[in-house]
Amino acid sequence: MNAYDNFNFGEDNIIAMKSNTALSETFGVLRSNTIYPVITRANGDIEICQPVKNSRTNSGASFVANQISGTVGAVANYMALAPTQITPASGDTALTGEITSNGCARASATYGSYTAPTSLNGTASYTLTHTFTCATASQAVGSVAIFNASSSGTLLVESALSQIYSLINQGQSKIR
């Protein structure tokens, strides 16, 4: 059994915490335009972190317009991480310093749920979930972004997290 910190985005972690269900080693939640980070350490300790807003880029706005107009395009469900806290800009097309190794490279996320607005002009939300396992070394994570491809592609949204988090590789542990 591996014993190291993982990095995950998904509403299921919050639901599990509220119901006091055992959690796997995971990190975070992405809903609508807010990231709700939650780190579950390899030793079972849970850190609930401050939510942060993500920023839609110009290319992300164009992507949404193309999807609404019926232009065929890839689904935006790839999550990418960076070790530093970026300063989002509308003209960004890539995540500065994107992690490409150590088990934390960009990966396809699972669409989990959609919550409709409760009123006209209300806020809708959706959930993307992926567990990143920093398997070969410790890893700093300070930013996250969503793309429509496993490499390159269109940058839909990006955000600096409220702080830089250290995910620690603690090696292997044996089940006896």
Image: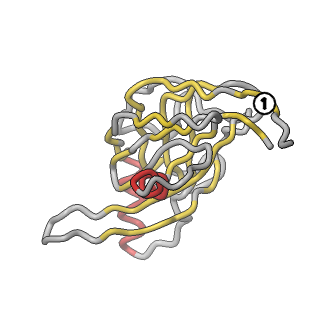
Q: Quadrant of the N terminus?
A: top right
Q: Secondary structure at mark 1?
A: loop
Out of 5 and 65, give the one closest to the viewer.
5
Task: Indicate how the structure is coloured in the image.
Answer: secondary structure
Residue at the bottom extreme, as displayed: 70
Question: Which kind of residue does numbered mark 1 sit on?
Answer: Thr
Residue at the left extreme, as displayed: 120
The structure residue drawn at horizontal position 41% and vertical position 66%, both measured from the top left corner, is 66
Out of 73 and 18, give the one closest to the viewer.
18
Q: Quadrant of residue 69?
A: bottom left
The structure residue drawn at horizontal position 49% and vertical position 37%, both measured from the top left corner, is 46
Left or right, residue 1 beside residue 56: right
129 versus 176 height, above or below = below
Out of 174 and 39, give the one closest to the viewer.
174
Q: Quadrant of the C terminus?
A: top right
Horizontal and vertical percent position of residue 71:
46, 72
Out of 120 and 15, give the one closest to the viewer.
15
Left or right, residue 157 beside residue 80: left
Horizontal and vertical percent position of residue 131:
62, 48
Q: How many marks?
A: 1
Counting other residues with Cα less than 10 Å from the Cα at mark 1, is it few (<14), some (14-19), or many (20 or more)? some
Horizontal and vertical percent position of residue 56:
35, 47
The structure residue drawn at horizontal position 39% and vertical position 54%, both measured from the top left corner, is 18
Q: Which residue is mark 1?
A: 136
The structure residue drawn at horizontal position 39% and vertical position 44%, both measured from the top left corner, is 36
Horizontal and vertical percent position of residue 143:
48, 33
